[in-house]
Image (spheres, helix red, strand yellow):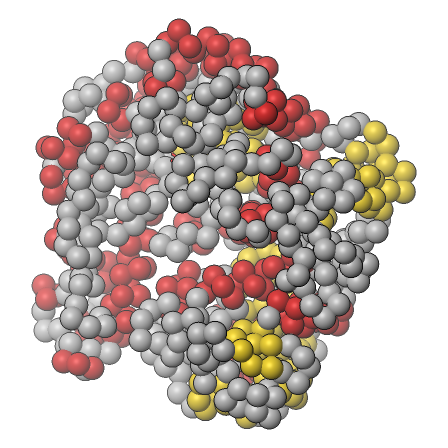
């Protein structure tokens, strides 16, 4: 388990917190009493208030109207519902952009974006920084000691709509950031390789954001721009956080993340928070959306160093922003929610409490739908509240695992820069394929940076880590030397942090560790596949490799390089390093990782061959058929959370079959004993407090 992360602090809310965004300002006050009564009925214990209320709280600059919020806070306090109070700075009001038009963001193409939607501010705007910190301070001063207040919610989804701004104010800020990074212009010229195409700078004033250019812009300028944009948004967060911390030093502070969100390097943000929190919305049309959900949850746990985290937003049913907004099937709300809990969330919250009547999100589901309480959604919400109460004792326990996948935002940014060997190398594709293979093997993983402490892991997977520092590469090498199993994918180790190619043959930084030398890439056509001697297929990529100490595991039988090595393996110290030179199909990936799990003594699902019939995901989507080579998914997740002297086994059944899973103890959702096995209905969930925590295996085979 990673140890990096925050000074973890949890809000004073008992058990697993339950609730959502509460926007009472959208409703007449006489409805608030009904809200509170229904919150009581559903077991709501924490609500996020005020996310988009800047225009109401500060109708004119410096003039505050807290009356309505006072009444909301008092009402919630009187009913023991904790408030995660937003600083309300996510969307500046019209008066702000009217008064400070230069604060409106500008696109790469030079178009200014206007108010009328939300998040219309330039992250480098001084006016915005001043006004947002003033509002945060005013809220902290007024509510800092209010009994309802349990934590701070800074802004909302930083970068969601405006992650970068190319205006002149941003240009000045970018130059400042670059001066801090490079000190002098000579170093910047060197790092950016500006001898190429006559790009050499002779004065700082000449340096600008990577605005629209006639052809490909400087790659390192673009990479630094991504770093700058993430840092600039983080500076907005830190500015508000520091104001809050000075006034309310004991209250936890968070800002809500968005899972695998490319523009923001959450590994660099998480240590600035007391608690990691996340918004996760499934894509209705994605048959693997439950696997994506698990991946996002594992990422959140990893960002917080393994500490419990908050699921700040999800939907009870449909959203409004997908092309076709699918309603959730019965039972999906519970499964999705408990998947998050299984993977370390100690709070389950939704956007939003009451579905809006007006505005762009009026067809987004809420905990309380337009149709009221005689609805599937409301009944499932109330049932979930009761379920979470029965899981109260799980709060604070931790998920442990012995496999990690390397995840690195700068490597993601860099590998997707333009003018590369193939447009088909997309970072998340590889990460997801690796994650999915482990998911189907029922192996829980953490995500780690390349330079993280890896001593707790038996296996580390490195999906296309195009950019890596010397320290990161050395760290991964030490992991293998000390007995670890590492599996590395193509187009890794290619460049240093300035995007300069590492010479002498690919995969640069990993050439020695992997015992290979690659002289040329042979990317494939868009729909082309190649066959490997072991029967697997590959797509996207092949490369001309000569072993230099590694053994050949399998070769290509066709494609541009028949007979050439496709997968290699090298023993290093007491560990093993594998190299995979193509984007393996799902079955091939799973078979390879299964073998590595066996070799590394990582337990996997033991019945891969038991389930032969097609499996219909309970949401009506057929998931079998993606399997070949005799390896099939059972579509059932088992995860363990552990605490001192206690162990909780979560079983989540995504299939249309009921299953019995070996377990002994008490099933907490039903309160019934599990003697030898626990029965899990089709699409159902079981959580067993295991009788003997000390001897509970790390992994439970599904029978
Ligand atoms: C995000 C925002 C919310 C809301 C939801 C809708 O998560 O934070 O304010 O817009 O999306 O899905």
Answer with the quarter of the image where residue 392 lies.
Answer: top right
Q: What residue sits 64% from the left and 34% below the top? A: 331
Answer with the quarter of the image where residue 334 lies.
Answer: top right
Q: Is residue 573 visible?
A: no
Q: Is residue 394 visible?
A: yes
Q: Nearer the viewer, residue 37 or 47?
A: 37
Position of the N terminus by quadrant: bottom right
Ligand 1 quadrant assignment: top left
From the viewer's perspective, is residue 167 above or below residue 543? above
Is 403 left or right of 25, judged from the image as shown?
right
Q: What residue sits 68% from the left and 45% below the top? A: 654
Q: What residue sits 44% from the left and 42% below the top? A: 324
Is 702 left or right of 553, judged from the image as shown?
right
Q: How many marks?
A: 0
Is 12 left or right of 498, judged from the image as shown?
right
From the viewer's perspective, is residue 634 above or below residue 222? above
- Where is residue 325 shown, x and y percent of the image? 45, 39
- Where is residue 330 shown, x and y percent of the image? 62, 33
Residue sitting at the far right? 675
From the viewer's perspective, is residue 62 above or below residue 429? above
Answer with the quarter of the image where residue 664 lies.
Answer: top right
Q: What residue sits 75% from the left and 67% below the top? A: 630
- Where is residue 65 shown, x and y percent of the image? 25, 16
From the viewer's perspective, is residue 356 above or below residue 418? above
- Where is residue 393 shown, x and y percent of the image? 70, 31
Q: Nearer the viewer, residue 640 or 178?
A: 640
């Amino acid at each position: 388990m990673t140890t990096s992360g925050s000074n973890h602090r949890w809000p004073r809310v008992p058990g697993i917190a339950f609730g959502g965004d509460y926007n009472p300002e959208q409703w007449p006050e006489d409805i608030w009493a009904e809200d509170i009564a229904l919150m009581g009925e559903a077991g709501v214990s924490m609500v996020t208030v005020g996310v988009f209320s800047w225009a109401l709280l500060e109708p004119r600059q410096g003039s505050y109207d807290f009356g309505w919020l006072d009444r909301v806070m008092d009402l919630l306090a009187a009913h023991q519902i904790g408030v995660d109070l937003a600083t309300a700075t996510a969307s500046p009001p019209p008066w702000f952009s009217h008064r400070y038009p230069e604060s409106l963001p500008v696109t790469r193409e030079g178009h200014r974006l206007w108010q009328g939607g939300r998040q219309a501010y330039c992250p480098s705007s001084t006016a915005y920084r001043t006004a947002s910190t003033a509002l945060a301070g005013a809220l902290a001063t007024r509510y800092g000691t209010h009994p309802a207040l349990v934590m701070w919610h800074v802004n909302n989804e930083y970068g969601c709509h405006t992650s970068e701004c190319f205006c002149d104010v941003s240009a000045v800020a970018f130059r400042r950031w670059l001066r801090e990074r490079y000190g002098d212009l000579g170093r910047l010229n060197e790092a950016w390789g500006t001898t190429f195409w006559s790009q050499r700078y002779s004065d700082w004033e000449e340096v600008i954001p990577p605005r629209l250019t006639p052809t490909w812009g400087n790659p390192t300028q673009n990479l630094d721009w991504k770093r700058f944009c993430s840092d600039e948004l983080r500076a907005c967060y830190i500015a508000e956080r520091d104001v809050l911390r000075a006034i309310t030093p004991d209250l936890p502070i968070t800002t809500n993340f968005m899972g695998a969100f490319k523009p923001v390097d959450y590994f660099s943000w998480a240590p600035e928070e007391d608690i990691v929190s996340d918004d996760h919305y499934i894509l209705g049309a994605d048959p693997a959306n439950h696997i994506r959900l698990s991946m996002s949850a594992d990422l959140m746990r990893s960002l917080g160093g393994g500490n419990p985290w908050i699921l700040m937003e999800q939907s009870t049913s449909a959203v409004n922003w997908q092309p076709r907004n699918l309603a959730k099937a019965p039972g999906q709300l519970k499964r999705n929610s408990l998947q998050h809990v299984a993977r370390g969330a100690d709070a389950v919250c939704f956007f939003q409490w009451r579905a809006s009547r007006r505005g762009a999100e009026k067809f987004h589901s809420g905990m309380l739908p337009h149709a009221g309480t005689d609805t599937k959604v409301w009944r499932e919400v109330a049932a979930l509240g009761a379920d979470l109460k029965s899981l109260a004792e799980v709060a604070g326990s931790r998920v442990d695992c012995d496999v990690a996948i390397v995840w690195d935002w700068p490597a993601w940014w860099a590998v997707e820069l333009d003018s590369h060997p193939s447009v088909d190398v997309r970072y998340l594709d590889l990460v997801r394929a690796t994650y999915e293979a482990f998911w189907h093997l029922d192996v829980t993983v953490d995500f780690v940076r390349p330079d993280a402490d890896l001593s707790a892991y038996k296996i580390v997977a490195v999906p296309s880590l195009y950019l890596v520092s010397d320290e990161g590469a050395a760290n991964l090498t030490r992991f293998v030397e000390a007995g670890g199993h590492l599996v590395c994918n193509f187009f890794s180790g290619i460049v240093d942090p300035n995007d300069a190619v590492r010479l002498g043959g690919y995969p640069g930084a990993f050439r020695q560790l992997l015992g290979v030398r690659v002289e040329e890439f042979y990317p494939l056509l868009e729909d082309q596949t190649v066959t490997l001697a072991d029967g697997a297929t590959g797509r996207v990529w092949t490369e001309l490799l000569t072993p230099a100490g590694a053994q050949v595991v399998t070769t290509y039988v066709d494609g541009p390089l028949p007979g050439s090595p496709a997968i290699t393996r090298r023993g290093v110290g007491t560990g093993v390093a594998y190299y995979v030179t193509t984007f393996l199909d799902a079955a091939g990936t799973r078979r390879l990782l299964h073998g590595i799990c066996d070799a590394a003594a990582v337990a996997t699902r033991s019945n891969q061959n038991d389930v032969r019939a097609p499996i219909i995901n309970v949401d009506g989507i057929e998931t079998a058929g993606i399997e070949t080579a005799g390896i099939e998914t059972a579509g059932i997740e088992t995860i363990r959370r552990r605490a001192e002297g206690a162990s909780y086994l979560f079983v989540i059944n995504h299939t249309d079959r009921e299953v019995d899973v070996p377990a002994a103890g008490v099933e907490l959702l039903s309160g019934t004993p599990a003697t030898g096995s626990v029965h899990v209905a089709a699409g159902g969930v079981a959580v067993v407090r295991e009788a003997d925590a000390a001897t509970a295996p790390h992994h439970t085979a599904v029978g």
